[in-house]
Structures are given as structure tokens and as C-alpha cells.
Amino acid sequence: MPSSACPECAESTVTTGLREPWCPSCAWNADQTTPVLFGWRWVDRRLHRVAGRLTDAQFAALADGPLSPRAMTVSRAVTLTAAVVLLAGVIAVAALGLWLIFLDFFSLSTVLGLVLVGVAFLLRPRLGRVSDLAGQGVVLEPAQAPQLFGLVERVATAVGAPAPQVVMAGYELNAFTTAVGVRRTRVLCIGLPLWATLEPQERVALLGHELGHFVNGDIRRGPLTQVAETTLGRVAHLFDTDGNAGDGFIGYLTAIITRALGWVVSTVARTLQLLLVWTSQRDSQRAEYLADELAARAGGTDAAVSLADHLVMIESIDTVIRREARAGNGMSAWRDAARTARANLAANLPVLRRLTRHTEVSLYASHPPTGLRAEMLERRPRQAAAVTVAESDLARIDDELAVHQKRVLRELTH
Ligand SMILES: [Zn+2]
Ligand SMILES: [Zn+2]
């Protein structure tokens, strides 16, 4: 790799991962791509630096301090309080509406009441359904994949998590858990492209991380966070009217006043929502470190670290998997291609890890930079694998999943 000396520290620069040369030693020119938050460059840059400082401070606090799921952080307290207040507000609007409807049936107040009930209905919290996830993967039946369900069960026990009620084979190079509906049905979705490219213990670590989200005190899994993050957005949308100017002077005046009021309400709501999302994302980043800790407990620290490094290299892995998929090749080819890509990138890994501390930092990010996740695992006390699997066990699981391979291939190549 051609390199020139860094103007700040005189170490050699690299072009790994970025268009222009940057310095892995002092991070000179590492922030070439600041995420666009407002579109004003100086504001975006300043907020990017704020996000960087918050990310570094959180890393430092958690690396040497306690990492407990039950700790009440400021960001969590703010998110939960906001959710309760917003929920109470929606209920109050509904109650006021009902009261107005029956106050003097049928009069102007009835109409106003109906409007308020309508607004409350539009602002109601939505808890989601399993069927909403249909576009992301296929729901697996325990009878179709007994080996996979068995492994999920073992890992759940190891990390002290309840087993998921729905397991899905996903189409994407990722994995996630979520909880849906009033009864918070626990869903685990394992993206086959990701699953196929992981080594045996890394797969255990992945399950440990995902199931860990059911016990890491992750407030995103609770119905209240959803209220906090979406209600204000709906309020903003509701008032975001550009009402047409009516006839005559009075109509014109009414339209201007309505528009001005709408603008004020929607801007205030949007700003508060932004602050709330930024706040709750701090807590989610903490939850990710905790889930990684459980990944290490399940699959061992080494596997959890190499899983994180796999994610550091995910773009290159994505490229080679899509290439294989376009050639019509299935899961075993994806794994071989990913192995080759990882081996080729191994020497660059420290630099790639370092770079994530710039490219993956954002106030909107739900996850800490992947490089820091790997480093956090290395800094925390080492853990031995609670669940070990043999290649042969995993080969049986792959046979169970292979029936969905065609579908995943279609989704990957379309
Ligand atoms: Zn430098
Ligand atoms: Zn996670």
C-alpha cells in the first residue's frame, strides 16, 4: 500500500477503507465522511465530534467498570419518563375526546370530541405483529429444524435467557431479535447469509448475543421505548400541514395562522423526538456491549471477538456473498468465499477496527462502532465457552436450513 507521512505525527498514512489517505496512529483525516444529520456541514461536524466523545466516554466507563443489565442510566430514565408522559398524553386526549362527544350530543363539542378521539387513535402505540416481519425471512417450525431449535435452547440456558417463541431464517447478512404484540412475543431472526459465513463457535456467540437481548435490560425490547421514539414523530407528521389558503381575507388569515401553528407544533415535536432518539440510542449502545458479554459467555471470548471482527469486515463479506449468490452458489460456497475474504483482510484488521471509531460513530447509531465492540471484549475478563459445538452438529443444522436456501438466493440477487 503506497503511503505518505502524516502531517500531524509523521507516521505513515493508509488509504484502507477511505478514499483519501488517513493516519491510523493519530486519526488524522479519519473523519472524511461525517454523517449528514442536518445538512449544514459545520453543525454535522460538530455533532459528529459530540457523538465521538460520548462513544469514547461510554467505552472507557464500561471497559473498567461494572457492566450490569439492571443499572438505571440517565438515558434510560429520560427515555422511560418521556414514554410515560407521552402515553399519558395520548390517553388524556382520548378521554377528553370521549367526554366532549357525550357532553351535549349532538353539537359542536361532539364534532370536536370525534376529532380528538381520531387524533388519539392515530397516535396510539403500535406493538407490531409477527406477520409484519414476513418480508425479512421465513418462520421455522420446531419440527422442521429440531437441531437448530436444540442449539438455540442450549444457548438460551447458558446466558439465562428465555427461549424465543418464534425463530426465523432471515434473508439478510444480519441477525436480530425483537418482541412484538401485546404479549411481547419473542422473535429471533437468523440471517442465513450471516449464519453460513460464521465458524462454529462464532455461531454460538451470535446466538448468545441475540438471545442476550432478552435479558440485557435492553429497553428497545420494551413497548415503552417504541412509544417514546415514535409518538412525537406522529405528532409532527399530524401538524405538518400546508393548508390551502381559503377564499377572501378571513380564509387567507386562517390558513396563515393554521400553517404557522402547525409549523411550530411539528418543529417542536420533531426536535424533541430527535433528542429522545439520540438519548435512547446511548442506552442501546450500552445494551449491545452487554449482549456481547453474553455472546462471550455462550461461545467464549475468542469466538465473540472474532464475531465482532467478522462484522468489522462485513462490507467485503457482503460483496463476496452476493458474487457467489449471483453465480447461483449456496451456503457452503458463501462460507468458503467469506473465509478467503477474512484471510485476505486479516493483516488490515487493526486499521479497519480503528477506522470504525470514525465511520460508525453517530448520534443515531444503535450500535457502538464494531471495532470498539471487539476491543471491549478483549478488555473485559476472559470467558470460556459455556456451549461448544462440533462441525458435525452444525452440518446437520445447515441441512435443516438448506431448504430455504433458494429463497434466500432469490432475495440476495434481486
Ligand atoms: Zn498521524
Ligand atoms: Zn445486538
Image (spheres, rainbow, N blue to C red):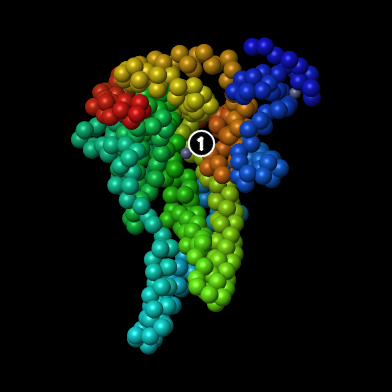
Quarter of the displayed picture in which ligand 1 can be seen: top right
The residue at 34%/38% (across/down) is 136
Q: Quadrant of residue 55?
A: top right
**What residue sits right under mark 1 in the picture?**
293
Question: Does residue 24 sit above or below 292 in this rendering?
Answer: above
Can you give x and y, in whole percent of width and height, for residue 295 in the image? Answer: 46, 33
Horizontal side, residue 118 vs residue 352: left or right: left
Instruction: Give amino acid for label 1.
Output: Glu
Residue nearest the observer in this picture, 315 or 104: 104
Residue 53 seen by the camera: no
Q: Is mark 1 within 8 Å of ligand 2?
A: no
Q: Is residue 56 above or below residue 26?
A: below
The picture quadrant where one finds residue 365 is: top right
Instruction: Return the x and y of residue 361 as percentages of the image width and height.
Output: 61, 37
Please tell me in which quadrant of the rendered image residue 165 appears.
top left
User: From the viewer's perspective, is residue 351 above or below residue 80?
Assistant: above
Give the quadrant of the N terminus: top right
Q: Is residue 190 left or right of residue 213?
A: left
The outermost residue toward the top is 2
Label 1 residue SS: helix
Picture mark count = 1
What is the crowding at mark 1: few (fewer than 14 residues within 10 Å), some, or many (at least 20)?
Answer: many
Residue drawn at point x = 57 percent, y = 37 percent: 368
